[in-house]
Amino acid sequence: MDKIIKTLSTLTIFFLIWHLIVTISRIPSYILPNPTEVFKAMQENSLSIYLNSIITLRESFLGFFIANLISVSIALGIAFNKNIENTIMPFAITLKTIPVIALTPLLVMWFGPGECSKIATAALICFFPSLINVLRGVKSLDRDLIIFFKAYSASKIQLIRMLIIPSILPYLFSALKVSSSLAVVGALVGEFIGSNKGLGFLIISNYYTLNTPYVFATITASSLLGIIFYYTIHLVERRIITWTVTID
Amino acid sequence: MGLICVDKLEKYYSNSRLLAVKNLNFTIEKGEFVSIVGPFGCGKTSILNIIGGIIDDYKGSIMINGESPSEARKKRKIGYCFQKPNLLPWLSVLDNILLPQKIANIREGNEKAIELLKMVGLKDYALMEPYNLSGGMQQLVSITRSLILDPEILLLDEPLSSIDEINRSKMQLKLLEIHKKTKKTTVMITHSINEAVFLSDKIIILTPRPATIKKIVEVTFLQRNEMTMFSKRFIRYVKIIKEELINGQDN
Ligand SMILES: Nc1ncnc2c1ncn2[C@@H]1O[C@H](COP(=O)(O)OP(=O)(O)OP(=O)(O)O)[C@@H](O)[C@H]1O
Ligand SMILES: [Mg+2]
């Protein structure tokens, strides 16, 4: 409760200062709109912002899902066969050195102006950080526990289900958290380049018409999207992982 | 014909370039309680893991009732208690004990696990997660788990080493009782000579690495009341073993 009050008062002060600066210095609205204008834009366009949020959320979720599915599969492969690591890691690292954002125009060309290219951008941007985290989990597998499972002649599937997945869960969740925010960024960038819907499109199109309050309103919605995405994962994590130690 | 026949066993770890076991021969009869003692790092755990079918690349031969160790393992004839408790932190004590059943796809109730937990005095801890237990208790859970599939052979790697003196004596009695009752062939590694003499029918004394037989001592007590640390016979056994271990170190 205390925390909420603190946050609210900080926000109020922030908006107040913003409001004062804008009123006193008479900055034109298209450069820095008054917070009240932003709220008004939000209200007036709430339906459009909501509908476009859903689109961006779907794109970023699908990209996020695909990227993590692939990175978990690769990590599991590496758990059973170290050679896979030597084959795949050079590609993954090369991919990482290319700024993924710079690839977006190509992705739009290849996957079309529809949702696919946004999903691809989101997936590509999530992939490497996710892989690194999940791999750390695989590397930290307890050798003695693997021997225990071997002693009782567990099958590969049992080994994955009963030992490997639970062992890497804490690492998987940090992969999910990192990639959740990145996925939203990826989807937005994809929408900047070529799109007629989504929050990224709203931002760009209103930027061209100098409807800055609307741009601000959409930016707020985008960051809310990221925050909700992140905290949903955080909450699920807290419910599932009860056995690890946290320092506090 | 023994139940476990080890013949000219040799184990070389190519990754660490270490010869852990060399020219090892012994047999273990059905129903025997055998202890393995030897200096640390001499190769005891390696021997136990080979008997248990966990390490497959070795030279020489091991037969368990006419089968290879890995066949015996696959038929789930062996119960394992490792040097570390090896409990899964995300499962309760009870679920950890049931894990071998789950892996073997045996659908039985919890009754047997509860029964075993009662026996070792950990029933109240059944639903706790392992990190709430002391190291000694975790080891006890691991011993309990080795019994859940009712194996013919028990392999115990320093099962009582992290348990306090008093409870250790109690657990030794418990192990003795379990052995008397079930007549499971048991191979136990221990660093405690007293424990070995108290529990075993036979004690295998190993040399420093590479492990090979220094001496095999058959332990027999004529009467139950000789089985205390203060009886003459007991002390003599302890002395023999100690001497063998000490002059093994010198070589
Ligand atoms: N997986 C392995 N890879 C390489 N070397 C190993 C491996 N396991 C054991 N060794 C080596 O083999 C030797 C014997 O090890 P082992 O664990 O069998 O000894 P131990 O008698 O059980 O020792 P302790 O009393 O300390 O438990 C040691 O020198 C060890 O370094
Ligand atoms: Mg050992």
Image (tube, rainbow, N blue to C red):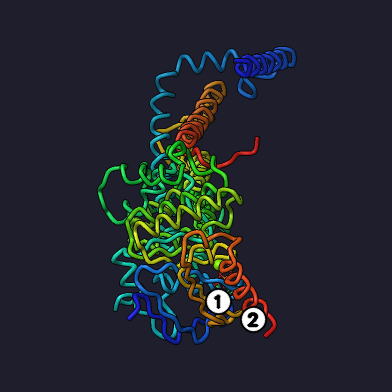
Image location (x, y in percent) of residue B240: 60, 75
Image location (x, y in percent) of residue B221: 48, 67
Residue at 59% over, 75% down: B42
Q: Nearer the viewer, residue B191 or B240?
A: B240
Q: Of the residues under marks 1 and 2, which one precedes in the sequence?
A: 1
Left-right relation of B245 to A70: right
Residue A25 seen from this side: yes
Residue reaching furthest left?
Answer: B107
Mark 1, secondary structure of its residue: strand
Relative to A148, residue A220 above or below: above
Q: Nearer the viewer, residue A71 or B40?
A: B40
Left-right relation of B100 to B130: left
Mark 2, secondary structure of its residue: helix
Relative to A172, residue A36 above or below: above
Number of the label disc, if any, that sits on residue B63: none
Residue reaching furthest right?
Answer: A25
Number of the label disc, if any, that sits on residue B248: 2
Q: Amino acid at mark 1?
A: Ile
Residue at 31% over, 63% down: B76
Determine the chain carrying the residue at label 1. Answer: B
The residue that mark 1 highlights is B205
Image location (x, y in percent) of residue A229: 47, 33
Task: Give the class, few, some or many, for how many residues have Cα within 10 Å of label 1's Cα (few <14, many ≥20).
Answer: many
Residue at 44% over, 58% down: B176
Ligand 1 lies in which image quarter?
A: bottom right
The N terminus of chain A, quarter of image = top right
Determine the chain carrying the residue at label 2. Answer: B
Determine whether label 1 and label 2 are within 8 Å by CB: yes
**Discs 1 and 2 lie in a common subunit:** yes
The C terminus of chain A, quarter of image = top right
Q: Quadrant of residue A52?
A: top left
Residue A105 seen from this side: no
